[in-house]
Amino acid sequence: MTTFKSLVTDVRSCTICAEHLQHGVRPVFQVSEKSRILIAGQAPGQKVHQSGVPFDDASGDRLRDWMGISREIFYDQNQIAILPMGFCYPGKGKSGDLPPRPECAPAWRDQLLSHLHHIEITLVIGQYAQNYHMKTKQSLTETVRNWGSSHSKLIPLPHPSPRNNIWLSKNPWFENELIPILQTRVSEILE
């Protein structure tokens, strides 16, 4: 049986999709067996690829604001695990970053999740993560709108990227109604 420590080492040294990554391999994630909140995102962007720190960009600033927590708490792996669907930056496409590489989740996700016994909520960010964790066939808007429960263990969120400013302006209910529920849940878990 693989130990958690050796599994994390294996993931950090993964090269299964190296031939498809024009910017090179650099798995970016944070995890501890003690983590209480899981952030299931898409894949690192270029800035995160360069820094090696998850959500070390404008998206991270917005996500921390939505959660109502500081950078210090956000980067405490004993509190917050960050496991994107693809651990490496997939590169640029015609209209933004490419989707997460399809090899990553099947290779590592279930193995890592099997060690996370203290997760109380999972923030499921974006369509790829929602399809994986929630098996949803709804649009992102419908999935997020239909959450609304303070008891849900899976909390779907739009991606906090500035690219989603138009979505946020068209859906003010998200920040007005759902963000306060999210902040309350996060606060209760981290107390």
Image (cartoon, rainbow, N blue to C red):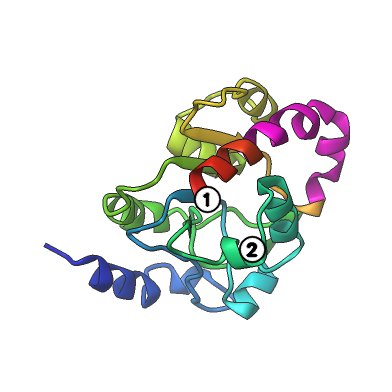
The stretch in magenta equals: 163-182
The answer to whether residue 37 is above or below residue 97 is: above
Please report the residue visible at 81 percent of the width from the left and 53 percent of the height from the top. Answer: 162
- Residue 44 vs residue 160: left or right? left
Asked which quadrant contains residue 92, the reply is: bottom right
Tell me if residue 99 is in the magenta stretch: no
Q: Position of residue 153 (x, y in %)?
A: 46, 33
- Closest to the observer, 184 or 156: 184
Asked which quadrant contains residue 74, the reply is: bottom right
The residue that label 2 is drawn on is: 55
Q: Main secondary structure of the magenta part?
A: helix
Label 2 vs 1, first from the N-terminus: 1
Tell me if residue 176 is in the magenta stretch: yes
The answer to whether residue 27 is above or below residue 163 is: below
Marks 2 and 1 close (CB-CB < 8 Å): yes
Q: Position of residue 12 (x, y in %)?
A: 39, 74
